[in-house]
Image (cartoon, helix red, strand yellow):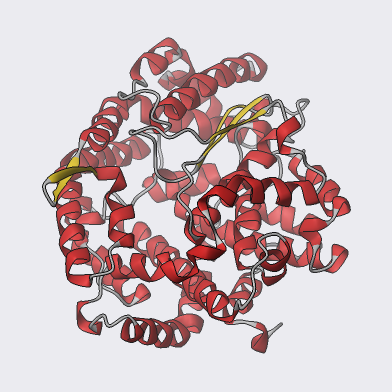
């Protein structure tokens, strides 16, 4: 297997595929059409090619390419189902108050609806639309599971662990520890906030969580028109001029079909990266935009000299950690005061602690559920278990119909969890070297650019070692969630 030749075609394929997803999610193209792209590059994912690459995974570059090829082989087989699901989502709508609300925008209406009865009704209608696409989602999942066996793995979990090295046998117990240590704090906070909002505890659902998280009372801190200027001020403090980065394109145009949530599209790393956002204001909007900007500045500073496997592939926990680093600035009181000019932050910071614990508990529970799901002989019948596991973690009702829509391929939830751990360790390393105002330090910016230049050559645990830790250490994350009163 000529890895250099394979890598060149892989990069061309990635550019076409990410470009197609960008145009669709940015609202530039109504229909997602990935089948022609897979057809043009079908040689990348021929079974014999994939098996050859699987035999090369002792070396890191070979393993990253084997992971890419295996994912491509599976997705190539599933592409028609993927198109069916995504195009149906793009076309779907919910009838609400005599008008058709696009399905993908319903979540914004739900989180903005102050009346909990109306919120629940809109949530119910949205969940009904979600359920309509569960049959193709289940077929897609079953086919992915079958491929794991066809490639010689005992099951889908073993395949993902072998190719992605997520250390699930360590991460699962670590998340059990996190759930146990944060249970009391989260239950008390959830009860208090539901009571304050007049939401009956027994009736609370994920729609109510969305409303609590939306927190309209803090909108004045995060105005819509200040999002991009705030991003520019933040990056400028680290010596990064957003306007002069020719390889980073910022798309803020309003389009009817555009995703309401920010995203990053690394079409060619580092030459052609898109940061896409649809500013609407509020702290959650800033969080998403800063998070995706973290991806964008990472990708645009990757060394051009690295192999494709280290520029585009590898452990996505790393790029997610850089994204969380910027996204978590909206929890940083120093950044809020200096960049946003905010004052009287005590109540807002309490909200961010509440939402951070909720999200970590949700993803910890998702990991446990997905380990069960991917080992189940009947994944389509796991809705009740999903509702139970996640409901116990987040302390509100979770709809069983969402069990398959709330699922990313190849344990991406594990990448998020590893990234959250790494981000805290990285942030503490930055504070130790450059102070609490590291985001305003050109030296810190230079330090980060050096790390970013590595792409994803180093997996998360090795990057943590480079920062001076023994590896990924969940205790730092738990202490960060619980607050300064229980420091290491």
Where residue 378 sits: x, y (%)? 19, 52
Q: Can the viewer see residue 273 in this picture?
A: yes
- Residue occupying the point 48% across, 59% down: 282
In the visual, does 157 lie left or right of 13?
A: left
Where residue 80 sits: x, y (%)? 27, 25
The vertical placement of 155 against 274, above or below, is: below
Quarter-of-image position of residue 142: top left
Quarter-of-image position of residue 197: bottom left
Give the residue furthest to the left.
98
Residue 287 or 312: which is nearer the viewer? 287
The vertical placement of 349 against 7, above or below, is: below
Q: Can the viewer see residue 456 in this picture?
A: no
Residue 38 or 452: which is nearer the viewer? 452
- Residue occupying the point 39% across, 35% down: 258
Residue 64 or 132: which is nearer the viewer? 132
Residue 475 or 63: which is nearer the viewer? 475
| Image quadrant in which the N terminus is located | top right
The vertical placement of 71 against 445, above or below, is: above
Give the residue furthest to the top.
40
Quarter-of-image position of residue 421: bottom right
- Residue occupying the point 23% across, 30% down: 84
- Residue occupying the point 80% across, 64% down: 437
**Tally of marks:** 0
In the visual, does 173 lie left or right of 370?
A: right
């Amino acid at each position: 297997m000529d890895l250099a030749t394979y890598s060149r075609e892989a990069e061309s394929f990635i550019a076409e595929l990410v470009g197609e997803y960008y145009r669709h999610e940015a609202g530039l193209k109504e229909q997602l059409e990935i089948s022609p792209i897979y057809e043009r590059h079908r040689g990348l994912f021929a079974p014999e090619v994939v098996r050859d690459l699987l035999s090369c995974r002792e070396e890191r570059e070979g393993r990253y390419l084997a992971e890419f090829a295996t994912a491509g082989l599976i997705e190539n087989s599933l592409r028609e189902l993927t198109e069916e699901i995504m195009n149906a989502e793009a076309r779907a709508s919910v009838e609400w108050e005599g008008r058709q609300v696009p399905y993908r925008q319903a979540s914004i209406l739900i989180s903005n609806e102050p009346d909990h009865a109306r919120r629940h009704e809109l949530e119910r209608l949205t969940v009904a639309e979600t359920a309509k696409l569960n049959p193709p989602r289940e077929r897609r999942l079953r086919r992915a599971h079958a491929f794991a066996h066809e490639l010689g793995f005992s099951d889908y979990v073993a395949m993902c662990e072998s190719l992605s090295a997520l250390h699930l046998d360590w991460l699962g117990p670590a998340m059990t520890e996190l759930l146990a240590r944060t249970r009391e704090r989260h239950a008390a906070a959830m009860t208090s906030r539901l009571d304050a909002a007049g939401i009956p505890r027994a009736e609370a659902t994920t729609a109510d969580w969305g409303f609590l998280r939306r927190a309209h009372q803090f909108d004045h801190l995060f105005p819509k028109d200040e999002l991009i200027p705030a991003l520019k001020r933040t990056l400028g403090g680290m010596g990064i001029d957003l306007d002069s980065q020719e390889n980073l394109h910022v798309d803020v145009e309003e389009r009817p079909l555009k995703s309401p949530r920010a995203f990053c599209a690394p079409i060619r790393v580092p030459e052609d990266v898109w940061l896409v956002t649809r500013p609407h204001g509020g702290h959650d909007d800033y969080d998403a935009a800063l998070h995706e900007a973290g991806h964008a500045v990472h990708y645009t500073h990757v060394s051009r000299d690295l192999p494709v496997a280290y520029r585009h592939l590898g452990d996505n926990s790393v790029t997610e950690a850089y994204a969380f680093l910027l996204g978590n600035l909206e929890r940083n009181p120093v950044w809020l005061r200096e960049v946003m000019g905010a004052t009287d932050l005590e109540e807002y910071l309490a909200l961010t602690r509440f939402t951070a614990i909720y999200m970590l508990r949700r993803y910890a529970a998702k990991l446990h559920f997905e380990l069960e799901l991917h080992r189940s002989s009947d994944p389509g019948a796991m809705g009740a278990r999903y509702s139970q596991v996640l409901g116990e973690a987040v302390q509100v009702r979770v709809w069983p119909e969402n069990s398959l829509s709330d699922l990313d391929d190849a344990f991406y939830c594990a990448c998020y969890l590893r990234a959250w751990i790494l981000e805290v360790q990285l942030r503490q390393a930055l504070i130790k070297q450059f102070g609490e105002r590291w985001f305003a330090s050109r030296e810190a910016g230079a330090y980060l650019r050096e790390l970013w230049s590595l792409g994803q050559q180093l997996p998360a645990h090795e990057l943590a070692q480079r920062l001076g830790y023994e590896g990924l250490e969940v205790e730092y994350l738990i202490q960060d969630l619980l607050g300064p009163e229980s420091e290491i």
